[in-house]
Amino acid sequence: MASKASRWADTAEDAAHEANRKREKEEKKRLRAAEKARKLEAERQAAEARKRAEVEYHEDDRPAKRRKTTPPGDGDANASKKKKDEPAKLLKFQAPPVTPSRSVDNYDKLNDIEEGAYGWVARAKEIATGKVVALKRLKVDPTDRSGLPVTGLREIQILKDSSHRNIVELKEVVTGKPTSGIESIFLVLEFVEHDVKTILEDMPEPFLASEVKTLLWQLAAGVAYLHDNWILHRDLKTSNLLLNNRGQLKIADFGMARYVGDPPPKLTQLVVTLWYRAPELLLGATTYGRAVDMWSVGCIFGELLTREPLLQGKNEVEEITKIFELCGMPTDETWPGFRRLPNSRALRIPRSSSSSNPLATGSVIRAKFPLLTKAGCDLLNGLLSLDPESRPSAKDMLAHEYFIQDPKPKQEAMFPTFPSKGAQERRRRRDTPNAPGRGQKAAEFGSVDFSGIFTGRERELKGGGFQLRVA
Ligand code: ADP
């Protein structure tokens, strides 16, 4: 039993990792203590400064004079006395005006666009100008009395800070009558006629190769802008990509988005809708970065080509299984360090090298997308690299051969138009999964045996059909 466990745990690499972790922990402790001491010192200095300032105030509480930094000479004594009697000249700073949010009553609702258990989006018209907009009510948990959830605040903050042709524009934030004692908050967004998911579901023919390129290029441009500005979207999927009648794609729904630093902080692994969720998240990573969005971009690329979501797992175990079927089993060569991720210990993954695993070469991707050019396969394969470090950045992607080779991306103005559902019809929320909610618990993998996954090449290329044994 012990020897079995040691197969995964007792390698020299793991021991080094453990030692490293301990060192990092010690270092963090030391930094925390130093930070505490620094804060105490700052507080002490601030208290002293306050005391000094109090002494310098006149009885009528007006500031007396600025403290001299050079010792006054003889002649200065009188001057300083004279100055003491004059009212001090204070610098005045203009405080930014605080304008309360306008009311949602400035808008007339035209029709619902999306209505579900949590979210609500409608098309509306600003009464004063007649301009058509989209109104999105922010989700508020009526049982939570602390007000707007942090996700709502982040969505507002990030949309307010963002300005890019491929990011949906936030025009203003308005408030409505309180529901359940909590004020309703609405985002007023530019109205965009379609979302890509609805188009894919309704179009009789798939997009042309040149059209896929236009959409994908714009998606990469929007993601590059976000990543350049330290924003992770964390819920990229076709229903969150809007498309207007001029062929312009706009990334929407920043409910999961957040700012990150470098190195990124510890983050929740429960992000991204299951079908678009990167393998490192499924394996429980809490330190992750821009590559999680690039994985979703890869899934969207596949979906644009086939009109079907690429990896439709019913749960986390099925999702990771589908990923391995498509991209190959991870090995220490193709994804160094994957065994250290919390959930990977539950997966009994054979310790084979990449050369004995034909799937790691991307042959399944080539077989699944026979019409995709070599450059296209190369890009898709890169985006769907199991190892997040191997995925191209959004900037790298924009410079990829795929966009240079023929057929060239179609000009946006030449993009086909589609009847807009959002402009006319009320829709119920579709049956696609959503991003996980806050407070939801991450799935813990039972023991999953992958040792029988690669038995026949033919079966591999058809994409599995093997039995999962979940303990
Ligand atoms: P939620 O966070 O509730 O999922 P989203 O922002 O994803 O809300 O919006 C849900 C749907 O509403 C989108 O898939 C799209 O169809 C529609 N939608 C969202 N924003 C707009 C917009 N600015 N213009 C038109 N339709 C929109």
Image (tube, rainbow, N blue to C red):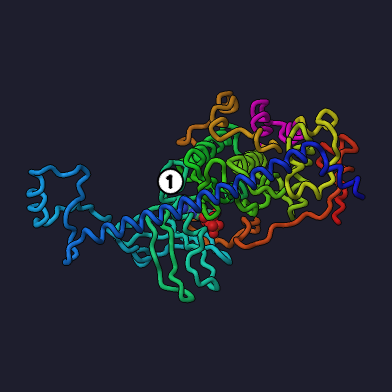
Q: Nearer the viewer, residue 262 or 230?
A: 262
Which segment did they paint magenta?
362-383
Magenta stretch, main secondary structure class: helix
Badge 1, how many Cα within 10 Å: few under 14, some, many 20+? Answer: some
As drawn, 126 above or below 200:
below
Which residue sits at x=60%, y=50%? 29
Residue 27 left/right relative to 61: right
Residue 172 appears in the rendering: yes
Q: x, y percentage for residue 20?
A: 69, 41
As drawn, 392 above or below 199:
above
Q: In the displayed image of the protein, which residue is found farthest to the bottom?
A: 180
Quadrant containing the C terminus is: bottom right
Q: Nearer the viewer, residue 178 or 218?
A: 178
Q: x, y percentage for residue 1?
A: 92, 50
Which residue sits at x=52%, y=32%? 410
Task: Name the residue beneath numbered marker 1.
Answer: 162
Q: Nearer the viewer, residue 138 or 444?
A: 444
Residue 323 falls in image quadrant: top right
Q: Amino acid at mark 1?
A: Ser
For label 1, the SS is loop
Residue 360 falls in image quadrant: top right
Q: Would you say residue 429 sits in the magenta stretch?
A: no
